Amino acid sequence: MTKINKKIIKIMGVGALIALLLCIVLKNSFFYHALLELIGIVIAVNMFIIAIRGYRISRHDYFTFLGISYGVVALFDLLHFLSYPQINILADNNFTVASQLWLVARSIEGFALVFSFYFFNQKQVKRFKTVIIYSLISIFLILTIIRWDIFPAVYSETGAMTNFKIIAEILIISAIVTAAGLLVKKRKLFHDYNVKFLFLAMIMTIVAEIFFMKNFKAIDAIHTAGHILKALSFYFIYLSIIRKLTEEVNKLSQAVDQSPSTVVITDVEGKIEYVNPKFTEITGYKYEEVKGANPRILKSGYHSEEFYKDLWNSITAGDEWRDEFYNQKKSGAYYWEDASISPIKDNDGDISHFLKVGEDISDRKEYEKELEEKSQQLKKANDKIIEDLNKAKALHEQFLPTGFPELEEVECATYYQPAKKLGGDFYNILKIDNLLIFYIVDVTGHGLDGAMLNIFIRGTIDSFLLSHAPLNDNQAPSKIMEFILQEFQKQDFPADYFICLAVGVLNLETKELKLNNAGIQIPPIILSKQGELKEIKEADLPISAVINMDKYNFNDQTMYLDPGDTLFLTTDGLIEENNQEQKYGTNRLEKKLRENHYLTPQLLVKEIVNDFYEFSGKKQGKDDITIFSLYNKPEIKLEKSWEIADRLDEFYIAKKECVKLLEEQSQLDSDLQQGILIAFQELVINAIEHGNQFAPNKKVYINLLITDYDLKLTVRDEGSGFDWESALEYEELKLEEGTERGRGIIIANMISDYLTYNQQGNEVQLIKKLN
């Protein structure tokens, strides 16, 4: 049936109803009025029920308020009907009460049509609160009319309208005109059919109110037309509300039907009442096949009975249940479903249905299975790699020297920090007869390949030294380099493997030093006792299989280490470190070397490393870092050691001996002697009082060493140590701050050129430059 046919049928039906009512009025006018009143009341009550019960569906506060308001109008229209003299239930043959109730109903209607716009997309109607407010107002108005008889009269005894009636009708008409204006203004916010129905209802209501402004005598054609228009206006508003509700229901229905998830609704016994098309698409079951059946038709036998029991207990208790099903389709195929089941409750809060929403996750589960299998494979591969790395690391660490040869004439210090778990740098120190052989290596890579290259280098050098024993001065670094190059060329190393290597040979008797550098980026540095730097810049190409043999020309650089001089070697990981796009660089390194030229190799390396930490903000660089320092000890002018118990009398004996020894040193003036003595006293007393805490079984060990260039004082206690770095944060003595031990350290630090503790904090070394 077309839309035009439907409209024609509706018009014919309304016309037939009007004709019927006109026939009735000719026979019985009261029956006509009663019938119209009851039709309007029934329509208004239906609007009220729709507004209350359809609230959760429509969520449209304009129509909700309008429906509730017409429910109140229905109440007063019913009371008006019951007040007719012909019925005589609420009034004793008194048409005044009926007229007053009628006017109240029309006033509420006019108010509702205007005030409903207040809730349009702005405010939320609180249904029960609105009903309560309306109820209180209604009770009050009913009492003023029926009980207290204080409501103004509507008609005079002659049947003429009172001024109150006229003003009220004008206000009602004005309100409805305002509502019609608001409707036109906001018409774009409504559906077209809502605008059409509401506007017709408002126009009919306005016309009806104009008809009702005629003086009351008896039922005539004007009043008849007014009652017909009122009933029709109720009907059009009802159509608007019901159409809006139908629209919302259709939206929900379409959303469910077109949902990409399966939707199943069952009754409280679990019998299926509805399934959406997606359910049919996935399972293969049509709605007719599953209607009245239990969802157990999808059971695959995968889940236990306890699983379904827990499900049922949860949803019947009013809780939502969510988990994964392994179901079977009609075809016998299996699929995974991620589902949630929720109870649906009626207005009384009782469970009336159950809703299941599911999603086919078979592809996801298959992907997860594949991912898990690949993860296990990767884990095994990773475990194998870690195992190999640990073996390589153990080999690398095994080949690193565990200690230095015992040397009297010189002193060595090293530092090694791999960039990764397995580094590519290497170093070694060997003493063979009167020769000290040392080398540092920087190879490509930081992993297993780098470790194997380092092992190759050490093995090759060891092989050279064994094959050329006994060694003599002719065994220069260049010979070692040539032997390594020859052996490297014999191996089948990849073309991208490079070896950067610096080798040195020091004659411990003559202090003649021979150096050869093959690709180490940082030239070896000679740091003199006066703080002057000399770079040995001559270098050869790194060792590589891609460089022709005839390109190499290893030339040794020969020099002598004077007493107090230091040789410093490092790989490029130190100067290449970046922090906020700035490199550590050679300038910073050279500045730090000059500042600390008088320090022993261990302390010099410590200062360089600490400066690197301060620059980078971390204790591991982006590349491997290797440092080697060799120091030619100057002649010792004086060395004295004391071992004293934690008793002050032994301290004073040692102090007197120290005073005598200092006075015998001509290079120490009286002020310097006094300063050293003060530092001696402060450090030793700190060790006795705060280090050993006067423990009778603990001792303090003191060593005083003087050369032509410096004075070194070392004090060690047997205590547990302390936070000495915090005490050294003070650059000057502040008696009001710090502990007593802190003040002693500050005093000693002010006297010395350099003061430091060991890591534990129970050994302090003080250095004072003499030249």
Image (cartoon, rainbow, N blue to C red):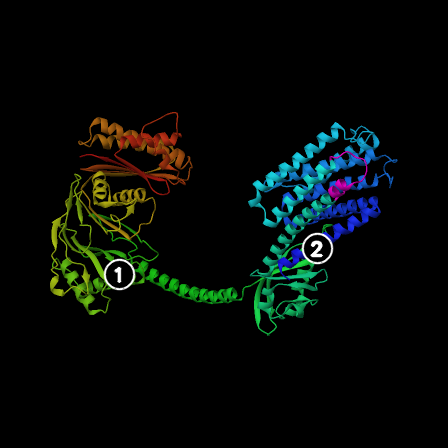
Question: Foreground mark, 2 or 1?
Answer: 2
The image shows residue 432, relative to residue 591, as above or below, that is: below
Expressed as whole percent of the image width and height from the top left, the position of residue 110 reads: 68, 37
Q: The disc labelled 1 sits on which kind of residue?
A: Asn
The answer to which of 161 and 230 lies nearer the viewer is 161
Q: Residue at x 82, y 30 (%)?
A: 158
Side of 314 where 608 appears, left or right: left
Q: Which residue is mark 2?
A: 12
The answer to which of 691 and 732 lies nearer the viewer is 732
Residues at discs 2 and 1 in contact (Cβ within 8 Å) = no
Q: Of helix, strand and loop, which one carries label 2?
A: helix
| First along the sequence among labels 2 and 1 | 2
Image quadrant in which you'd find residue 590: top left
The image shows residue 466, relative to residue 347, as above or below, that is: below
Q: Is residue 220 magenta?
A: yes
Image quadrant in which you'd find residue 595: top left
Q: Which residue is mark 1?
A: 454
